[in-house]
Amino acid sequence: MSLAKTFSVGLYGLSGTIIEVETDISSQLPSFSLVGLPDASLSEATARVRAACTNSGFGFPSKKVLVNLSPAAVPKSGSAFDLSIAVSILAANDAVPKSALDQICFIGELGLDGSLRQVPGVLPMVMHARNCGFTRVICPLGNLSEASMVEGIGVLGALDLKSLANWLNGKGYLEQPSSLAPVATPEGVIGMDLSQVIGQNQAVEGLIVAAAGGHHIAMVGAPGAGKTMLAERLPGILPALSTEQALEVAAIESIAGNGQIALRLDTAPRFQAPHHSASTAALIGGGTGVPRPGAVSKAHHGVLFLDEALEFHGHSLDSLREPLESGRVLINRSGGSAVFPAKFQLVLAANPCPCGLSGLADRDCTCTAMAIRRYTNRLSGPVLDRIDIRLNIKPVSLGANLGLFDVGPSTTQALTRVAAARLASAERLDSFGYRLNSEVPGPLLRGRLGIGEKALKDLNRMLVTGKTSMRGYDRCLRLAWTIADLEGQQKPGVDQVRIAVSLRGSDNLLGV
Amino acid sequence: MTDARQWLGRYGEDRACEYLVGQGYQILDRNWRFREGELDIVCTHRGTLVFVEVKTRTSLATGSPFESITKTKLARIRRLAASWCANRQVANSQVRFDAIGVLVRGGRVTIEHLKQVL
């Protein structure tokens, strides 16, 4: 009887489990069985591993081979266990020394010829292996750059099973991660400069305020007024992600598994613009069996843009409430529940009515009052409540197109202002455990961060006369702080509060 | 079946019998035919009734001799064993199913014996 064991990582959502792959080879009629709750894709590993071992020149033991994936009660899926199963069998068969396998995690899919193929989710797997005290991970060459983004663990890339077995036997070498700095500097999207937006100076200022304070924003305006153009330029004026944030985003993209493997750590804030026909699962995450991240998680630390927001299904929009509040989504499936981070900046764009022409001076809206009401009611109060800034985007007049207006700030200029404002707010809020003005809770705004009676005069009057709710009051305060940070003021005064009130608009989406 | 293959099978079974006798087994029956097939060797060892399936090969090109003993074949041997017991009126005996692989290569005979394969 011969026994060996290797380690791999199983993923459910973003959370990992170290999986022990045990192999027992006993003198029996030849058979190969895999136990430990494998799903269909994993059960097929037996066929791949058998062919890979044979075609790598090791031969497959003509005995009873039993492989157990432990803990046996955790459901496992995917092809990333192939490599650990193969190495475990080779070790049990004495083709590689068992002593060489300590503290190594094996990740990868095997081809029939023994070559190693890249798999999704390597980044969170390597992170988990490191957190569990492993000192080395061996992964396919194609995943090497992604895996090397994780610090504090040695990563090696193997081309095929043969070269890996040689290395375990002390012969040959495996690929080291390249010594290039793994962090990519954001280059910005070419052809997407803020200065291209003309004749919308007020909206551009609103966008800069949103970027500086991390405020959610809604834009209402006629078709062709430039809402999409503005939204697409928001990621450009957001500061680059920190390494930690970029890793979180890269981990989500790694398991989203859209076939693209990151070569370098991308620190640019992401932009997600799901189509309005998107299902709730596509928006917040889901899927059969294994949960996958949705658009809200792919927009983590970035921008989620819902164009034609009122055309989305009502329940899809309502499903945004939880991530908007908590910055994460919990997805429950029969197999278990997964938590994905979803801290995004929401940008909504909508037409003021179904025909899109209401509120224009020179065009007549053909919608009935009832139709408009039904249209705007699709966005429920709870979602609307979380939006700090409402911009009314008017179509650009002819003068702007003829170059009669001043050119607004460029992306670089806006980014400088945003970065300075964010630095100021982070310094002030650091002792309270926040970074952005949009994160500060109301009691703190009215208590220790109070700005004085004089500045609050207008806002207090609005509250007394019922023109704003208490929640709207707090939102105006947050905005006022962001505006003060942008202007370099110590604290907001009368002017900043007034601008905040006008940016906040009314509680009604169309009453901007 | 060609004569050469028949001869090889017979040769392998003879070698297997010699091996079993050497190990202290007592041969009860050989090539016992019944409706659906044949039991290669029936023997007994320390009170246990042992049914042995013998596979003979001259090379490993198509895998080990044991690889051709499938689940279906094992199930058939099991049914045949029950028939054998009924036929010989043997009951209350401990029963075991073994497989013996005989490799005849370059004039050398290698015997591998797997016990309790069912």
Image (cartoon, helix red, strand yellow):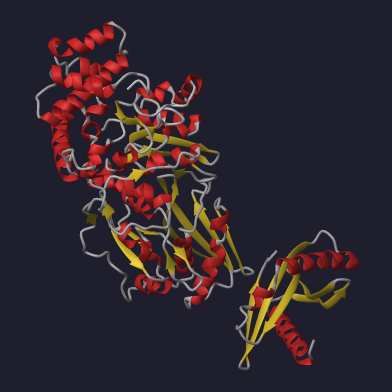
For image coordinates 22% across by 28% down, the residue present is A437
Indicate the quadrant containing the C terminus of chain A: top left, top right, bottom left or bottom right: top left
Residue A393 at x, y percent in the picture: 31, 31
Residue A342 at x, y percent in the picture: 36, 37
Name the one closer to the observer, A24 or A466: A466
Q: Does residue B40 lie above or below A120 as drawn?
A: below
Q: Is residue A401 visible?
A: yes
For image coordinates 58% across by 55% down, the residue present is A40
Q: Does residue A405 lie above or below B109 as drawn?
A: above
Name the one closer to the observer, B63 or B38: B63
Q: Does residue A221 lie above or below A119 as drawn?
A: above
Indicate the quadrant containing the N terminus of chain A: top left, top right, bottom left or bottom right: bottom right
Q: Is residue A344 visible?
A: no
For image coordinates 42% across by 74% down, the residue present is A162
Residue B18 at x, y percent in the picture: 71, 83
**Residue at the extreme bottom of the image, as rendered:** B107
Name the one closer to the observer, A179 or B53: A179
Position of B38 compared to A191: left or right?
right
Position of A452 compared to A321: left or right?
left
Q: Does residue B25 lie above or below A321 as drawn?
A: below
Position of A258 compared to A202: left or right?
right
Name the one closer to the observer, A357 or A486: A357
For image coordinates 17% across by 44% down, the residue present is A410
Residue A207 at x, y percent in the picture: 25, 34
Where is residue B45, by image quadrant? bottom right
Q: How many marks?
A: 0
